[in-house]
């Protein structure tokens, strides 16, 4: 009787301790998410204030989401005019990203590009939750915090934050939820996350196809794997070849595989008949191999030990098989953020599999006490975190040590003074680096080589800016504008503001 009473008394105490630990983890995860969101948002907003953001692409998304917030189609005049699609061009004809519409209500609170940067910071940070859950099941709670920290400080996240805002903001969260919820047995929630991924961008079906490949490696999951594989492939084809054209886009605009063929059928036939050509393309130029090395080295080469890496394989090959758009295989853009959460989860799973490997366990036993010290799950996860911290100074987060990020230098002060000369509501052709400073209160066009006849022009004649080939061309463009009737109303540190009276052409 006394034993029964003791067990009965022990049960609630144990449950209470478990509940206390759970609450502590909830608060700790909430603090980690909050800190990460604050870091990401502050970093992006500081870059915006310092005029380190760009019209291409921040203003494009700002105009599109503003249009959504006013219950219209996601029109981005800056994209349509510069790329020859016309001022009424919907960004759904560029990339099929209808999920951007969920950000529209935020513009009722604050209308401006800063809203997108904060939203992106929060969305990136929220991926910490499924990463922690997945890691906690594999390696323990302590490892979960380390893996979440490694993701939050990873260079793909930092580089995405440094390159304005993109639809990739949704992908780490949704891809991590898809994998973690499926792993937890919540197949319906995983399927919902997968469906939402298809609304992020036209090629996100490739992530679903990769997830299907992963499921094909698991017993009892092959039917689900085939379903994900088929759904992902079909969605990519429909969104790329039908939806984009339906919204006024060009299906071949981003075709980057001319070495393989002029279109997808010819490229597929080439790969089947000349597979080594495709293999050679993966390493041509060698910068592709360097970039792929950068993806796995900070993850301690652990992702290849897990079949979860298959999830990232199709979207990675989409870029590595290309022979155009060199930014696709450069680290200093947002493209690697599409697969970073998947690779972190693959590293965690790879570490867990290596710990369970019979041969490695036997070698650890032979090492005695030292081997036992290597067995805790937090050790490889701590290695991931340490590696991520080591990479910080070499990528975008390294800019946090730059004093000019916090206090405007002369160039940034001149840019602020230049944009202040343009009145609210005006149509303005803006240099790539100053467009975001105007987008919240004016209608921005990209200042390029083509006359747009906007009443206002904010040019840069000192530093090379997209899309001009050289500073000399920028200076020549300003001279032509002056010759056509524009007068200079401001000039400082290379920034020139031009104005011409006349009707608004758009």
Image (tube, helix red, strand yellow):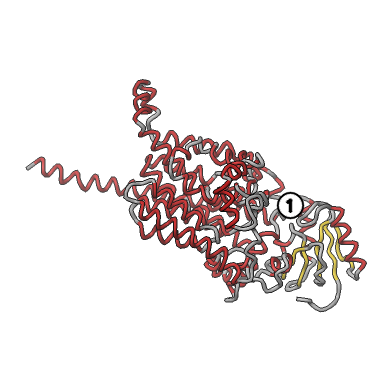
Provide the residue designation for mark 1. Answer: 408
Of residues 183 and 487, the one drawn nearer to the viewer in this rendering: 183
323 on left or right of 99: right
**Residue most toward the left?**
1
100 on left or right of 499: left
**Residue most toward the right?**
483
Of residues 219 and 398, the one drawn nearer to the viewer in this rendering: 219
Residue 501 appears anywhere in the view: yes
437 on left or right of 456: left
Position of 485 relative to 323 (above/below): below
Give x and y (percent) for residue 465. Answer: 78, 54
Give residue 239's quadrant in the image: bottom right
Give residue 483's quadrant in the image: bottom right
Give x and y (percent) for residue 257. Answer: 64, 52
Q: The C terminus lies in which quarter of the figure?
A: bottom right
Q: The N terminus lies in which quarter of the figure?
A: top left
Residue drawn at (55%, 38%), measured in percent from left and top? 389
Give x and y (percent) for residue 12. Answer: 21, 48
**Residue most toward the bottom?**
503
Position of 392 relative to 71 (above/below): above
Callout 1 crowding tier (Cα within 10 Å): few <14, some 14–19, many ≥20: some
Question: In the rendered picture of this protein, how many numbered marks are placed on residues?
Answer: 1
Of residues 443 and 188, the one drawn nearer to the viewer in this rendering: 188
User: What element does badge 1 sit on?
Assistant: loop
Position of 194 relative to 323 (above/below): below
Residue 291 appears anywhere in the view: no
Residue drawn at (37%, 53%), measured in percent from left and top? 182
Residue drawn at (66%, 59%), measured in percent from left and top? 57
Of residues 352 and 65, the one drawn nearer to the viewer in this rendering: 352
Residue drawn at (40%, 55%), measured in percent from left and top? 226
Give residue 195's quadrant in the image: bottom left
């Amino acid at each position: 009787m006394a034993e029964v009473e003791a067990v009965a008394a022990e049960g609630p105490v144990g449950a209470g301790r478990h509940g206390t630990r759970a609450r502590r983890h909830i608060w700790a995860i909430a603090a980690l998410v909050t800190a990460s969101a604050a870091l990401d948002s502050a970093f992006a907003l500081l870059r915006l204030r310092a005029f380190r953001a760009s019209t291409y692409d921040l203003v494009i998304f700002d105009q599109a989401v503003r249009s959504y917030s006013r219950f219209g189609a996601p029109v981005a005049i800056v994209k349509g005019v510069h790329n020859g699609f016309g001022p009424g061009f919907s960004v759904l004809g560029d990339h099929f990203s209808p999920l951007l519409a969920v950000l529209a209500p935020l513009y009722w609170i604050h209308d401006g590009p800063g809203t997108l940067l904060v939203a992106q910071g929060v969305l990136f940070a929220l991926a910490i939750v499924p990463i922690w859950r997945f890691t906690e099941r594999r390696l323990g709670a302590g490892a979960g915090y380390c893996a979440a920290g490694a993701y939050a400080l990873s260079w793909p996240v930092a580089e995405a934050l440094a390159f304005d805002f993109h639809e990739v903001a949704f992908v780490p969260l949704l891809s991590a939820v898809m994998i973690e919820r499926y792993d937890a047995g919540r197949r319906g929630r995983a399927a919902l996350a997968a469906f939402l991924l298809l609304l992020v961008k036209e090629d996100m079906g490739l992530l679903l196809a990769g997830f299907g490949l992963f499921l094909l490696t698991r017993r009892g999951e092959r039917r689900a794997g085939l379903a994900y594989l088929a759904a992902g492939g079909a969605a990519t084809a429909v969104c790329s070849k039908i939806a984009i054209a339906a919204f006024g886009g060009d299906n071949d605009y981003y075709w980057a595989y001319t070495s393989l063929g002029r279109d997808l059928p010819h490229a597929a036939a080439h790969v089947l008949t000349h597979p080594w050509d495709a293999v050679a393309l993966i390493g041509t130029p060698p910068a592709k191999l360097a970039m792929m090395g950068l993806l796995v080295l900070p993850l301690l080469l652990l992702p290849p030990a897990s079949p979860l890496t298959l999830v990232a394989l199709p979207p990675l090959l989409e870029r590595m098989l290309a022979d155009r758009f060199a930014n696709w295989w450069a680290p200093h853009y947002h493209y690697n953020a599409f697969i970073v959460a998947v690779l972190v989860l693959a590293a965690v799973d790879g570490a867990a599999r290596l710990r369970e490997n019979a041969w490695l366990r036997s070698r650890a036993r032979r090492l005695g006490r030292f081997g036992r010290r290597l067995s805790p799950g937090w050790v490889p996860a701590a290695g991931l975190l340490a590696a991520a911290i080591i990479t910080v100074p070499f990528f975008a987060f390294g800019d946090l040590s730059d004093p000019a990020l916090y206090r405007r230098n002369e160039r940034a002060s001149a840019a602020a003074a230049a944009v202040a000369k343009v009145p609210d509501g005006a149509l303005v052709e803006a240099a790539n680096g100053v467009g975001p400073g105007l987008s919240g209160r004016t209608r921005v066009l990209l200042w390029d080589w083509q006359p747009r006849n906007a009443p206002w022009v904010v040019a840069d004649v000192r530093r090379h800016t997209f899309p001009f080939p050289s500073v000399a061309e920028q200076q020549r463009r300003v001279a032509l504008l002056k010759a056509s009737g524009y007068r200079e109303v401001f000039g400082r540190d290379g920034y020139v503001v031009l104005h011409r009276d006349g009707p608004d052409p758009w």
